[in-house]
Amino acid sequence: MQLIIVSGRSGSGKTIALRVLEDLGFYCVDNLPISLLPTLVHAVMEQYSKIAISIDVRNLPEHSEELLDSLNFLPKGVEPEVLFIDADDNTLLKRFGETRRLHPLSQKELPLVDALQAELKLLEPIMERATWRLDSSDLSLHQLSEEVRERVLGRADKKLIIVFQSFGFKYGLPKDADFVFDARILPNPHWQPELKLLTGLDPDVQHYFRQQPLVTKFIYQLENFLGTWLPHFQRSNRSYLTIATGCTGGQHRSVYISQQLAERFEQKSVKVQVRHRELMQHD
């Protein structure tokens, strides 16, 4: 039986994730007190092979030991997987402002920004057990739904999906990256007037990079490094591996390198996705 616990801070997208899991055939329960989890699983496991529950700060025990005790009373052979969804504080503040919802901890008369920090602290025990972590800060509802679906199906199919992500260091590190590589040491077409307004997806910029030995060496060595360790990640029963490459603004070097790596690993019959964070932001 597959059991998925969906958790995360308020406003991060837990409800959307639960709807996706319901569409995937999971028996879903929203806002279940963690102490009732073993009882629920025992009651429905003969009828359902896939169960998903959402747990938030309102129904967590006061002490993390109680959380671990509840998980220990699950039926033998049932190992819960945890999908933890979060977003940065500014995004959550904006979402609460748009929806005018009341934060669950607001009843304690905490300012919203303090309530969000307190909530993250309370959720730490379950976050540390996460099988998958998702940062929904830059994702639309559709994109978040796709991310949840791909992670869950990837684990079910035992297929490792490699995500090659470009980003700009000046906008912050990606929270869901497994590896981060810094391409800021490489030649920058930003200083070429005819290339400045283009991106690493444009042929002229790609031609520029193909003439740069340092860029070729950088990609070659990254490919060898990832190729060496990829079999070990595939055997570790994980569904996602996110390789993030950053440059200053996330427009040229990181985009080109992520594209090149994706193309090389696609030729190795690896399931690959490419995500250009800053280009998505500025579309």
Image (tube, grey):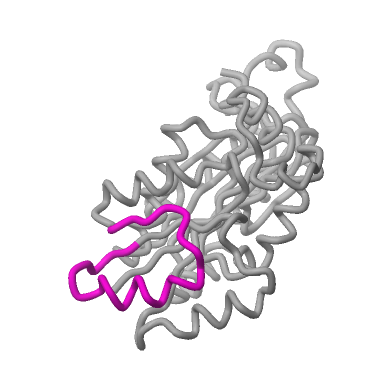
Position of residue 176 relative to residue 123, above or below, is above
Left or right? Give the position of 265 relative to 135: left
Which quadrant, please, contains the N terminus? Answer: bottom left
- In the depicted view, which residue is nearer to us: 85 or 218? 85
Left or right? Give the position of 275 relative to 27: right
| Magenta region | 27-51
Taking the spot 70% from the left edge, 53% from the top edge, the residue there is 119
Taking the spot 71% from the left edge, 44% from the top edge, the residue there is 107
Tell me how many marks there are: 0
- In the depicted view, which residue is nearer to us: 240 or 11? 11
Position of residue 103 relative to residue 33, above or below, is above
Q: Position of residue 113 (x, y in %)?
A: 79, 39
Taking the spot 37% from the left edge, 80% from the top edge, the residue there is 78
Residue 248: say if magenta: no
Residue 45: say if magenta: yes
Position of residue 253 relative to residue 176, above or below, is above
Taking the spot 71% from the left edge, 32% from the top edge, the residue there is 93
- Residue 14 seen from this side: yes
